[in-house]
Image: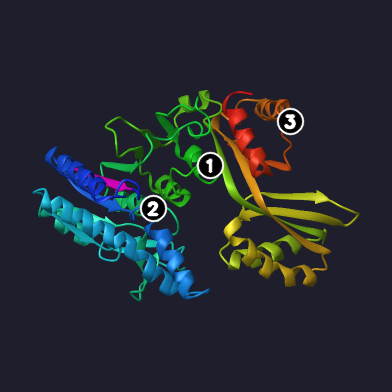
Amino acid sequence: MRLVVQKYGGTSVGTPERIRKVARRLIETQRDGCQVVAVISAMAGVTDNLLKLAQEISQEPTKCELDNLLSTGERAASALTAMAVNALGGRAISLTGAQAGILTDRNYTKAHIANVSPRQIHELLSDDYIVIVAGFQGQTPEGETTTLGRGGSDLTAIALAGALNADACQIFTDVDGVFTCDPRIVKEAEKLHEMAYDELLEMAGSGAKVMQSRAVEFAKKFGVEFEVRSSFKKSRGTITKEETPSMEDVVIRGISLDRHQAKLSIAGVRDEPGIAGRIFSNIAAAHIIVDMIVQNASIAGTTDLSFTIHEDELENARKILMPVVGEIGAKRLNTMSGVAKLSVVGIGMRSHSGVAARMFECLGRNSIMAWGDCCRPRRQRNRLLDSRSGALLGRRSLGEGG
């Protein structure tokens, strides 16, 4: 019997009627001869409302209590989904992330999965239950609740699919699959039928909201093939899998836009070994992810070091770096919000020349000035930094071919 893991996002379970539709699909999948595990996100808007409520109560809530609060959204949605399945004549039971055997570290709000032991899931499947798992969460070895960061239900589904050796992993969302560009911005955007892990990883890390980047990393590491598809249609979606030789025939797979970036620049950094490491080690200790890094030679013996992070981390990073700037003898720290990142993605760029030239020519024809650019190793992604309005126009221009 085939074992299928299905994940449903917040929009897919956003109303009671949509929950019932999900329940019908789960029952249909089981009747087709499959064992079914469903990972459920919180209903659309619930997590944001809980976060807003927490901030009204406390300006700086502890991350441990924040995880206890935010995890309730997925628990409620998974219980409601199990109720819907049972009301329609099926047999379902809901589990928390802890009950599903998801063990994490203690990095609250952004926990990493350490191990998955799905013993209880196997037992329930053998008793013909549809197992409904609350996404986005796990527990520490001490039994404390943790959450896996924004989009963490994707990671829950991929991790369970790997641990259960599932025959299929399906990520149901409110779009038909992965597109070359955001179809809401570029009407000519086309749905991709398949793509490599590295390509989706680059797109997810560059602002495409279709999958959590950590989930794609996990899938690549453990070889979990998965499909992104619509929960509102029966059509096939986009398969993400190991790279095949034919994939390099497509030079550019997609264009993504992240309008939630911030830029930090440290002027007058001494050009000495270990200085940059000192800067970034302080950032790493706070679990802040650094994206683009650019160094520009300034006066003799010094350099200007610039890098980007998510805008939500800007104030925290500024507080961390202010004393470091003085300690290393740099001149000043400049910060900038309202920054966007435009990325052109495709593994075919490794073996085809002229991509950067065409990209800058297209932007130039539309009078768009980029503040900085860099390329990923192995040339799977070209990235530009610009204002939000400029990047939006740039994405539309590149997506339409100039």
Residue 7 image label: none
Residue 283 higher or lower than 176, as above or below: below
Q: How far apart, in angstroms, are the residues tagged by discs 1 and 2?
A: 16 Å
Q: How far apart, in angstroms, are the residues tagged by discs 2 and 3?
A: 40 Å
Residue at screen point 54% across, 33% down: 347
Which residue is nearer to you in this view: 263 or 13?
13
Q: Tell me residue 174's x, y (percent).
A: 36, 40
Q: Say which quarter of the image contains residue 241.
A: top left
Q: Earlier in the sequence, mark 2 or mark 3?
A: 2
Residue 155 image label: 2
Q: Earlier in the sequence, mark 3 or mark 1?
A: 1
Residue 315 higher or lower than 131, as above or below: below
Which residue is nearer to you in this view: 376 or 331?
331
Label 2 sits on a secondary structure element that is helix
Q: Tell me residue 144's x, y (percent).
A: 36, 74
Give left or right: position of 132 versus 151. Answer: left
Q: How far apart, in angstroms, are the residues tagged by discs 3 and 1?
A: 26 Å
Residue 367 image label: 3
Q: Are marks 2 and 3 in contact (CB under 8 Å)?
A: no
Residue at screen point 35% across, 76% down: 142
Is residue 127 in the magenta section?
no
- Residue 382 appears in view: no
Q: Earlier in the sequence, mark 1 or mark 2?
A: 2
What's under tag 2, amino acid-wise?
A: Leu
Nearer mark to the viewer, of 2 and 3: 3
What's under tag 1, amino acid-wise?
A: Glu
Is residue 5 in the magenta section?
yes
- Judge the density around disc 2: few (<14), some (14-19), many (≥20) Cα neighbours within 10 Å: many
Residue 280 higher or lower than 326, as above or below: above
Q: Tell me residue 97's x, y (percent).
A: 30, 62
Q: Which region of the structure is painted magenta?
A: 1-8
